[in-house]
Image (cartoon, helix red, strand yellow):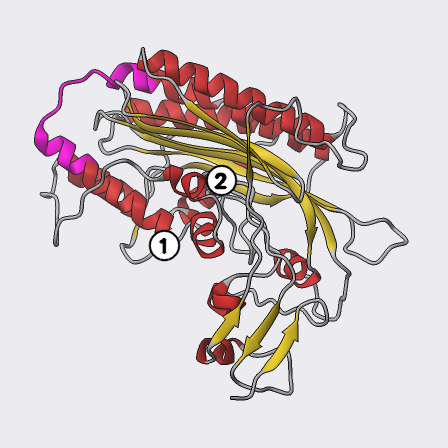
Amino acid sequence: MKKCEIHWRERPYHKQSSEAFCVNQIPIGAIMPCASIVSAPSYAFPFRSSSAATSSISPTAISLTKRTSNPRIEATSFRKCVVRATVSIEKETPEAERPETFLRGVDEAHSSSSVRARFEKMIREAQDTVCTALEAADGGAHFKEDVWSRPGGGGGISRVLQDGAVWEKAGVNVSVVYGVMPPDAYRAAKGAPTDQKPGPVPFFAAGISSVLHPKNPFAPTLHFNYRYFETDAPKDAPGAPRQWWFGGGTDLTPAYIFEEDVKHFHSVQKRACDKFEPTFYPRFKKWCDDYFYIKHRGERRGLGGIFFDDLNDYDQEMLLSFATECANSVIPAYIPIIEKRKDLPFTEQQKAWQQLRRGRYVEFNLVYDRGTTFGLKTGGRIESILVSLPLTARWEYDHKPEEGSEEWKLLDACINPKEWI
């Protein structure tokens, strides 16, 4: 059987479509600092998503059972070929203690005044603040913490609380990773013209990502994540232009609608946005409604919030302050709702409805969340990748809530997004 050797160092290939990922759909050299930090459609490699997993793939040679004269094999050929590959995936290393910073070894990043350093400080402080508030709300349970480092640069802190009095499962993860990604990954990420041929692209990515699943069906699930990304290259060296961008968001997923709760949540998001730009809230609220859409169900995952990505069309200092304000708004937006709802009595039927809505949450995360699906395909840290999933969920055949019921009202709001404030 004839075969050809394709060396990624010579002519790397990367296709933006997720269906065209080579090496059994593993994109070469892609990284993901937070696996449900996930997000915008403009990226072929989801470095944004709900958990702190990191994967990177070393340049490798691939043996194909089909000879071709053109190394830039079309996606259809990849799907038809039998691929034999040895892919070196960089695994994280467990650490005994939290480092003061994950930025050691990053050029020009040691300064406490750098955006990188201040963003890391912000997300780590946010992780501490959120975890403290969640433990206080639970009244007894505590987070389990895993600290890990990445041989290529950086690391992260994963914290999970489960089977508490209030929280079925709560994950709050941070990661700070850096290294080099191949030029095709950069072009796919930024939509650069195909005639541009940058060299390997240095990158930096940091983020916080969290999903909180309460036990009580009247207490809503919350997801939030905030992230910062850079590509960098000296002016006189081959490589991509120096670029940076922010992304993130906070969204609410209840099983039952308490209108005062939803209005409170959206009001906090709007106040955070309005401090910086009056167009942010309506723009990012619609973006959130559009992003968290379960296509095969024709409905949204929840009742929205804000979501943004690839944001760099404002002053960098302003956007750093905006991301900080949004992260600091998580507790005032959410904990008052939890305190009101965590101890309400509920029936088995109401718990079953919550579990059905959790099923929708699972469907979105496993089918559409790019951070989750990417991590599963590339052998990332599985505990971090799946931290966004609830402990329990439910599926019933052809379940339809009775029209006019409280369950129907929630489903209708997920199908037809509302302006809550």
Tell me residue 357's x, y (percent).
23, 41
Tell me residue 346's x, y (percent).
13, 23
Q: Distance from label 1 to label 2 (Cα)?
A: 19 Å
Q: Which residues are magenta?
A: 337-354
**Left or right: residue 181 compared with residue 402:** right
Lower sequence index among marks 1 and 2: 2
Going 64% across and 87% down the picture, which residue do you hit?
Answer: 69
Q: Which mark is residue 263?
A: none
Q: Amino acid at mark 1?
A: Val
Sort mark 2 into few (<14), some (14-19) or many (20+) by Cα contacts within 10 Å. many
Q: Is residue 125 visible?
A: yes
Q: Amino acid at mark 2?
A: Phe
Q: Is residue 317 visible?
A: no
**Left or right: residue 133 compared with residue 147:** left
Going 60% across and 66% down the picture, which residue do you hit?
Answer: 14
Tell me residue 67's x, y (percent).
57, 87
Going 79% across and 56% down the picture, which residue do you hit?
Answer: 239
